[in-house]
Amino acid sequence: MIKRLRWPGGLKYRIFTACLLLVIIPFSLLCLIGFQQIEQILKQQQVEQNKREMGSFREDLLDLAGLMTRSLILINQNPSLEQYLSPDSTHAPFTAMREINRNLDSLANSFFLSTPSVFLTVTDRAGHAYYNYTSRKPIDGWQVYNDIYRQLQEQNARAPYYWKVTDSYVSKEIASGSKLLTIDSLLLDSGSEPYGAVRISMDHRQWLKQWTGTADPQAAYLVLDDGGELIYRSQENALIPDELARRFKEEFRLHPEKLADLTSEREQALYLASYMPSLKWTLIKKISLEQVFAGTNAIKRTALISLVVLTLVFIAATLLISSNVTKPLHKLRDQMSRAADQELRVTIPTTGYRGEILQLLTSFNRMIADIGTLIYRLKVEERQKESVRFQILVSQMDPHFLLNTLNMIKSQALKNKDSTTFDICVSLGLLLETSLNTELDLIPLGQELGFMEAYMHIQNIRFASRYHLEVEYDPSLYYALVPKFTLQPLVENAIIHGFADSVSGGQITVDIQASGKELVILVMDNGAGPEAARQAAAKAAVRRSRKGIGLSNIRERLELLYRGQASLTLTRSVEECRTIVEIRTPLLISEPYAKGESGHV
C-alpha cells in the first residue's frame, strides 16, 4: 500500500496523493501560520480594547472637569453676581442671598444633572458666603476668599484658577467622602480687580466609583496624583509597583498625551495608564494577563482541535470520493470507445448512481441521443436546401424572360419614338433587375430611392400624375445601407389604401435623417388612413388577386436582418390628417470603392 501511495498508478491514488501534497499539507501549514497571526492579532485587539477603555475613562473625567471649568467661567461672566457682591452694592443682604442662591441652583441644575452632586460656593471681600449645599460647619467666607487669593498670588498669575483636593466641608448626608476635587478662582470686575471668589467642588470618589462599577469588573482601577499619592482605587488591595509608577511618570513627562502600557512579569499583569495634565492625575488600569489572553487561548485550542479533525475527515472523504468518481469514469471511458464503432448506438446504465455522477451519465446518454437527432436533422435540411435552390433556379427563368421581353418592348418604343412607353420600360426594368438579384439583402439608400422613384414614375404615368412624391434626406446618407424593397412597398400601400377613393390624388413625403447611431425613415401621406381603407375594402368586398407585400413582410425582414435592433411603427395624425410610417434601423454607411461606383455591397 505504501509503495502504491509513493508511486501511484491509478486515478484513485493519484487523486489522493495530489490532495495530500497540494491541499492537506499546505492547508495545515497555512492554518498553523494563520493561527499564530490570529493569536497575535487577538492579543493586540485585547490590548487596544483596554486602551480604548482607558481613553474613554480619561475623556469622561476630562469632560466632567471641563463642565466645572465652564461653570467657573459662567459665574465670572455673570453680571448679576458683581451687582450683588460688589463692595458698592446697595442691595439688602437677604435680597443678595436669594438672588445669588437662585443663580447657583440654576447653574447646578443646568450642567450637573447626570453627574454626582457639585457644590458651588461664592464669597465677597466682606466675608459673606453663599452656597447651594448643607455644610458640615459654618463657612468662613473671609477665610475662603483669602485662601484663594493667596494661592493665586503664589501661582504668579500662571492661570486664573487652580485645582486641588481638599477636605470635605459638605454634610455627610450629601457627600460621604472625606475628600473633594475643587477648582478655585477669583471674581474680577471690568477693571480686573477682585470683588469675590468662587469655589466649585465635587465628590470625585463617588464619580470614580460609579464609573469603575460599570467598567470591567475583573480589572483594578487606580488614580494617583503627581506626587504618587493614591487618590482612588477600585479594589482594596490594588497597588502598582513603585518601579512601574516611576516609569509611567517618566513616560508622561516626555509624552503627556500618550496612552502607555507596561507588563509586570512578576505579577503577570498588564498596566495601562493615561495622564491628565490639568488635574495632574494618572489613571491606571491593572488587568491579569491570563484574563487578557483567555479568549485567545480558548480560540487557539478550539482551532487546533478542529484542524486535526477536519484533516482526518478530509483524508477519509478524499479516498471515498475518489473511489466513487473513478468507477463510473471507467465505464464512461469504455462506452465512449465503443460509440464510434457502433455508430453512436450506445448507452450507460444509470441505476445505482446519484448526484453529479448520475448527471454526468445521464448527460452522456442524452448527448448521444441529441447527436443522432442532429445528424438526422442536418441530412433533412441539406435535402431541403437542395430543393429550395432548385426552385429558385427554376423561378428565375420567368423573370429573365420578362426582362428580355421588356427590353424588346423598350427598343420598339424607342424606334417608334414612344417616350411614355420607353420610360415605363426603363422604370420597370430597374425593378425587375433588382428582384432578380437575390444575393443582396442591404443596398445603399440612393439605390433604394431610385427604385421608389421608378415605381412612382410608373404610377403617375398610369394615373396621369395624380400623386406627388417629395423626398428629403441628407446627401451624406446616400450610401447608408437599408433593406432592399423597403420604401417601394410603403409607397405602394399609400397609393392602394390611402388614395384608393381619392379622385384628386395625394401627397407622399419621405423624410430620411440620422439620429445618433440610428437611421430614421419617415413615409407620410395625406390619404384616408389604414382604418378607413379597411372599412372601404370590407364594404366593397374587394379582394386582390395577388397578396401585397404589406407592413408585416417588412417587419419580418427587419427582424431577420437586425435581430431586434430595428423597428417599424404605423401612426395616424388626426390633427394633420396624415398617416406616418416610421422605420428605425442601425446607421450603417458603405462608401464606394472608387469614384462613380454604385455602392453595392
Image (cartoon, rainbow, N blue to C red):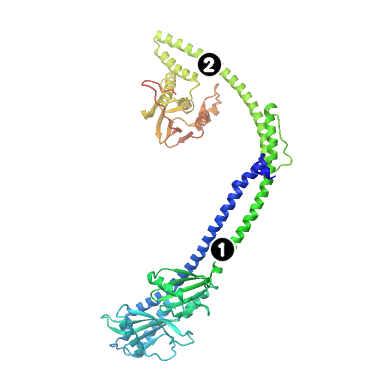
* Position of residue 118 measured from the top left corner of the image (x, y, whole percent): 43, 81
**Position of 77 compared to 573: left or right?**
left
Classify 287 as above or below 562.
below
Three-letter amino acid code of the residue under disc 1? Thr
- How packed is label 2: few (under 14 Cα within 10 Å), some, or many (20 or more)? some
Q: How far apart are the alpha carbons under marks 1 and 2?
A: 89 Å
**Position of 216 compared to 104: left or right?**
right
Q: Is residue 296 visible?
A: yes
The answer to whether mark 1 and mark 2 are in CB contact below 8 A is no
- How packed is label 1: few (under 14 Cα within 10 Å), some, or many (20 or more)? some
Front position in the image: 46 or 454: 46
Q: Secondary structure at mark 1?
A: helix
Q: Quadrant of residue 344?
A: top right
Which label's residue is closer to the chain start, 1 or 2? 1
* Position of residue 316 measured from the top left corner of the image (x, y, whole percent): 68, 49
Mark number displayed over residue 296: 1
Q: Quadrant of residue 13?
A: top right
Query: Which quadrant: the N terminus?
Result: top right
Three-letter amino acid code of the residue under disc 2? Gln
* Position of residue 183 measured from the top left corner of the image (x, y, whole percent): 38, 80
* Position of residue 305 measured from the top left corner of the image (x, y, whole percent): 63, 58
